[in-house]
Image: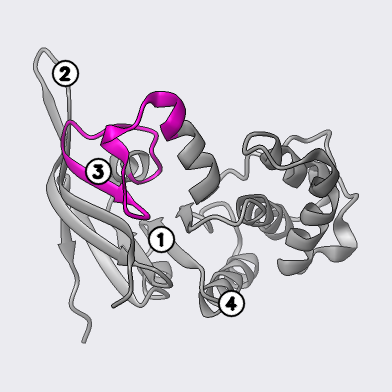
Amino acid sequence: MTSPVVEFDQVALTYPGPPPVEAFKPCDLRVDRGEFVTVIGPSGSGKSTFLNIAGLLDTPTHGRYLLDGIDTGALKDADRTALRGRRIGFVFQSFHLLPHRSAAENVELAMVYNGAPRRERPARAREALERVGLAHRTEALPTRLSGGERQRVAIARALVARPSLLLCDEPTGNLDTANAATVLELLDELHADGMTVLVITHDGEVAGRGLRTVAIRDGVLHEQVRP
């Protein structure tokens, strides 16, 4: 049986008040290794809270979250940060690239935080950029790249640590139709190569790219049944 990368066991998050706000209600979720799962929901549904929990940015106030079989609730803050850096690659809507650093340097910077030896970083950055089709743009500044190229640099940065989970938040939200299609094709390729992909989106077309879709509304996850 495939081992889960993400496992929620009655995970919930309530922000303290007054009054307390139940942002994410008790939910179960399992994402097995090599799956491509999409999470869809309208604005205000709880997608950001879900992202923060899955990405180890917020700690649940109830239940257990296991990442690669590790009980994240039992970890100290420093250990959670280290686990996040090693096991999760983030891709955001707004790219978050440093404008005065080259594509390769932006990817290398991700390795500063996970302890990769300095001598390995340039080669690993080039390898990651080649994987996303940007071997010819390693020295380009983000200001000289298209939106689709910038997102592919961001994906390379997420991949360079060789994470267990690629966690994407509205990865096509700032892209035109053609660039969005290129990024989605890349996610399909990464999944085909065995990467576990979890995409959070409000776009039904993007959600349809996953093999499974989970809907979130009012802080509750619902598995969607496809026709």
Magenta residues span 54-80
Q: As shown in the figure, which amino acid type bears the numbered disc 1?
A: Leu
Query: Quick one: label 2 or label 4, which is nearer the N terminus?
Result: 2
Q: Is residue 88 visible?
A: no
The amino acid beneath tag 4 is Glu
Tell me, yes or no, whether the highlighted magenta stretch contains residue 225. no
Is disc 1 placed on a helix, strand or loop? strand
**Which amino acid type corresponds to the residue marked 2 in the rendered image?**
Pro
Q: Are marks 3 and 4 in contact (CB under 8 Å)?
A: no
Q: Nearer the viewer, mark 3 or mark 4?
A: 4
Give me the C-alpha separation between circle 2 and circle 1.
Answer: 28 Å
Please report the residue visible at 53 percent of the width from the left and 80 percent of the height from the top.
192
Where residue 48 appears, as percent x and y from the top left, is 34, 41
Report the residue marked by disc 2. 16
The amino acid pointed to by label 3 is Gly
| CA distance separating discs 3 and 1 | 15 Å
First-in-chain label (4 vs 1): 4
Work out whether residue 165 can be spotted: yes
Q: Residue at x 87, y 58 (%)?
A: 137
The reply to whether dot 4 and dot 1 touch (C-beta < 8 Å) is no
Q: Are marks 2 and 1 in contact (CB under 8 Å)?
A: no
The residue at the point 65 percent across, 66 percent down is 179
Quadrant hosting residue 17: top left
Q: Quadrant of the N terminus?
A: bottom left
Specify which label sits upstream in the sequence, 2 or 1: 2
Query: Which circle, 2 or 3, is nearer the viewer?
Result: 2
Mark 3 sits on what residue? Answer: 46
Residue carrying label 4: 189
Residue identifier under label 1: 198
User: Residue 57 in magenta?
Assistant: yes
